[in-house]
Structure formats: structure tokens, C-alpha cells
């Protein structure tokens, strides 16, 4: 599946600023000399109350424009129609640290949000970041790239390669059920997708346009406003 504006790199160096900072620092891309493969490095943190002994901080801001790599632990694929919205939870794929090694966002933290239509495509809109191993919940304004390429599915489509193990939206399940009927299609989907097809009116539709999204590849996020931690 082709995705518009493919990411050229999944390594970014972001600037983390204290709440007392006045000016946000622009995003910079990290080189192999400044970023490890196991975590993202951000620039030097500024404590809200600097101390020559303690390196702890109270509030940190990661400016808009920075990158958060994500994955899904729930599914390998998401199938929705172009006019459909779906709630999705993504997982932060790697530790995000300061250049000094301070952990800002641990890998495994979860981001709740929604896939929803955006012009001629669909896009993930993040809403809340839940920090792993803590009770901290933070509002987050971040989005994925826009996904514009669709798959045309009809009676001749090999659905096993597209739909097996997929998380299928209710609208997508309806139109696919109309194409394939209730028996063969349910066998292809298995337990996870079959629930979306309960009570469908079957037959009549010949083909459907759907987005088939790979969340591990397509839904990395870019901050649209400063993230306050």
C-alpha cells in the first residue's frame, strides 16, 4: 500500500524546554552520532529551578513539529471506509530522552486518538498521552501523515492478504459483507473481524474503496502544538 509523504527517517532530535523558557527551539534531525537505535535523544533539558547538584526537573515542553514514533499492539492492519472514523490506541515505539539521557516519554506509553476523514484521505488525530508506569495523563495535539491511497475490493479480490487479522471498522464491515456474503467472508476474517458483520444486510454491492492502514508504518506522529510534560 502506498502512502503519501513517506517518512525518510524515524530518528529525530527534539528540543525540550522548561516552563520558564521564552523561546521554542526549532526541530533538528539527529545524526547517527547523536542518536542511539534504542531511543530518541532530545536537546539539553532546562530545569524549572536549576540546581548544580540535582538534574531533576518539574516541567518540560517538547515543541511543536517534533516526531513521535508509534506502533499498534492491537492489530497489524486497520480497514476503514473513506468517510469512516475509528477510535485507536497507539503505543510509543521507543524511549524519548534528553541529550543528557533523561527519560521524557518511556516506550510503551499509550496515545489515544481517532482516525477520521481529512479532505481526500484519512489521518490519525492524537488526543491523550498516557505515560507508562505512572498515573500521568497529558493532552496531546499530534497527527499522522495523511493517508490517501485506497484499495478497491470486489468479489475477485484475494481478501486473505488484506483482511486476515485486521481491525475492521463498522462501515467497512458493512460494505464488505454486502460484497462477500456471510459465510466465506467470516471464515476469512476470523474472530476479530467477524463481530463487525453481525446483522448485516448482505448482497447487492459489487466493490468498495477502503483504506488498509498499517499502524506500525503509517501512523507515526508529529506534534502540532507544544507538548507539556
Image: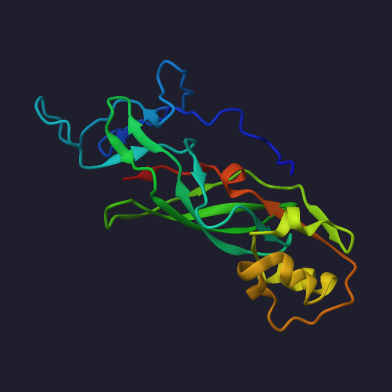
Q: Quadrant of residue 78?
A: bottom right
- Nearer to the camera, 95 or 63: 95
- Residue 33, image x and y in percent? 42, 15
- Nearer to the camera, 165 or 123: 165
- Residue 166, image x and y in percent? 65, 59
- Residue 49, image x and y in percent? 15, 35
Going by the image, does 176 lie left or right of 198?
Answer: right
Q: Residue furthest top?
A: 33
Which residue: 32% across, 25% down?
Answer: 99
Describe the colour scheme in one phrase: rainbow
Which residue: 31% across, 39% down?
Answer: 104
Q: Residue furthest left?
A: 53
Count the marks: how many? 0
Going by the image, does 186 lie left or right of 87?
Answer: right
- Nearer to the camera, 179 or 187: 187
- Nearer to the camera, 218 or 199: 199
The N terminus: image quadrant: top right
**Quick check: 225 above or below 193?**
above
Going by the image, does 219 lie left or right of 227?
Answer: right
The C terminus: image quadrant: top left
Work out whether residue 18 can be spotted: yes
- Residue 5, image x and y in percent? 68, 36
**Quick check: 120 above or below 183?**
above
**Quick check: 178 above or below 22?**
below
Going by the image, does 52 lie left or right of 13?
Answer: left
Work out whether residue 223 can be spotted: no
Amino acid at each position: 500500500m502506498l502512502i503519501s509523504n513517506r517518512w525518510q527517517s524515524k530518528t529525530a532530535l527534539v528540543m525540550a524546554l522548561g516552563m520558564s523558557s521564552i523561546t521554542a527551539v526549532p526541530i533538528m534531525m539527529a545524526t547517527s552520532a547523536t542518536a542511539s537505535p534504542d531511543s530518541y535523544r532530545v536537546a539539553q533539558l532546562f530545569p524549572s529551578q536549576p540546581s548544580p547538584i540535582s538534574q531533576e526537573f518539574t516541567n518540560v515542553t517538547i515543541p511543536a513539529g517534533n516526531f513521535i514514533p508509534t506502533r499498534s499492539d492491537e492489530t497489524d492492519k486497520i480497514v476503514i471506509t473513506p468517510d469512516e472514523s475509528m477510535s485507536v490506541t497507539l503505543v510509543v515505539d521507543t524511549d524519548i530522552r534528553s541529550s543528557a539521557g533523561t527519560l521524557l516519554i518511556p516506550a510503551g506509553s499509550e496515545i489515544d486518538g481517532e482516525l477520521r476523514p481529512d479532505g481526500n484521505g484519512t489521518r490519525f488525530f492524537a488526543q491523550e498521552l498516557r505515560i507508562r508506569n505512572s498515573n500521568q495523563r497529558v493532552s496531546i495535539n499530534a497527527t499522522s501523515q495523511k493517508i490517501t491511497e485506497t484499495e478497491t475490493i470486489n468479489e475477485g479480490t484475494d481478501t486473505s492478504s488484506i483482511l486476515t487479522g485486521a481491525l475492521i471498522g463498522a462501515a467497512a464491515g458493512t460494505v464488505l459483507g454486502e460484497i462477500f456474503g456471510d459465510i466465506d467472508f467470516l471464515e476469512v476474517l476470523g474472530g476479530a473481524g467477524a463481530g463487525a458483520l453481525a446483522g448485516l444486510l448482505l448482497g447487492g454491492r459489487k466493490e468498495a474503496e477502503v483504506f488498509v492502514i498499517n499502524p506500525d508504518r503509517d501512523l507515526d506522529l508529529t506534534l502540532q502544538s507544544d507538548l507539556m510534560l
